[in-house]
Amino acid sequence: MKGYGAFLKKEILEYAKTYKLFIMLLVFAAFGITNPLVAKLMPEILKSLGTGGIVISVPEPTALDAWTQFFKNTTQIGFIVMVIIFSGTFSSELSKGTLVNLLTKGLSRPATVLSKYTAMVLLWTACIALCFGLTCVYTVYLFPDDEINNLPFSVFCLWLFGLFLLAVLLLSAALTGTAYGCLLLTGAVVASCVLINIIPEAKRYNPVLLASENMSLLTGTAEVSSYGSSIMITCIAAFAFVLLSVMAFRKKQI
């Protein structure tokens, strides 16, 4: 794959120059700091809302509440920010014609696609690691005596779903070549996965399981072994989407 390393470096530098790197790190760092703080302060906030003699009884917060915030913020806001940030993959370079010059100078198309996916994966990994690390530090400080079950595995499942989502986004970008088309196609795939969960028998094989049932692992109501099928399907699907992205970009007229 000629030019893979050079193009990967170019992608990372471009993320820094366009502030995409800064925005994502800032968002996930904010989540990492506020997750345990919101959990700690939520009872006081709810009590302050009580008016007219109404007494609101709120249980004491625990570390589990902090990690609930972590998974909720990452899946509800973090993924949306990530998809929006990366939706311009290919579109800006295709519109400006910069890829034409690079390809004519020897950059291979598979290297172009794979370096883009690698750069996205590296940024996503850095963001989730930053958020996880900050949440851990503040949670241990605020809730020192609490223990959580299966936390590393639960975060791994969330990270793996992120790789799947990035593969879907990459294929969408390669097929459509526009940011709006990428967002629509990615949204359609995710919506389809959510709808599949309506079928009880299919739920254990669905990649969405990795990002929707994390708290079940933490509370001990789900076994680690029950996620094996979903992990396998997610890995296969992500690999297939990346491969299809390479094939689609090879045939794309630039």
Image (tube, helix red, strand yellow):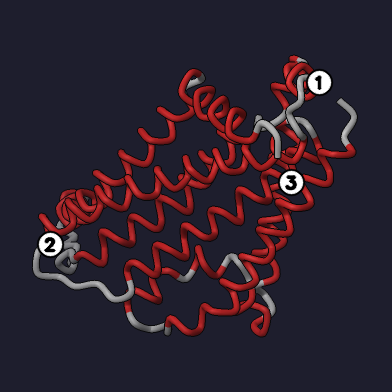
Q: Are marks 2 and 3 in contact (CB under 8 Å)?
A: no
Quadrant assignment, res 68: bottom left
Residue at 89 percent across and 39 percent down: it is: 251
Q: Earlier in the sequence, mark 1 or mark 3?
A: 1
Q: Earlier in the sequence, mark 2 or mark 3?
A: 2
- Residue wearing tag 3: 171
Q: Rounded to the nearest whole Å, what is the CA distance between mark 1 and mark 3?
A: 23 Å
Task: Point out the frontmost of discs 1 and 3.
Answer: 1
Q: Earlier in the sequence, mark 1 or mark 2?
A: 1
Q: Element under label 2?
A: loop
Q: Indicate whether 207 appears above or below 170.
A: below
Mark 2: which amino acid?
A: Phe
Residue 90 rendering spot, x and y as whole percentages: 71, 30
- Residue wearing tag 2: 143
Q: Element under label 3?
A: helix
- Residue wearing tag 1: 104
Residue at 53 percent across and 40 percent down: it is: 82
- Decide: few, some or many residues near mark 3? Use Cα within 10 Å; few <14, some 14-19, many ≥20: many
Is residue 180 left or right of 228 when viewed as pictured? right
Mark 3: which amino acid?
A: Leu
Quadrant assignment, res 246: top right
Give whichever of 28, 160 is nearer the camera: 160
Q: Rounded to the nearest whole Å, what is the CA distance between mark 1 and mark 2?
A: 57 Å
Residue at 69 percent across and 79 percent down: it is: 199
Q: Rounded to the nearest whole Å, what is the CA distance between mark 2 and mark 3?
A: 42 Å
Task: Point out the frontmost of discs 2 and 3.
Answer: 3
Residue 47 appears in the rendering: no
Residue 148 rendering spot, x and y as whole percentages: 25, 72
- Decide: few, some or many residues near mark 1? Use Cα within 10 Å; few <14, some 14-19, many ≥20: few
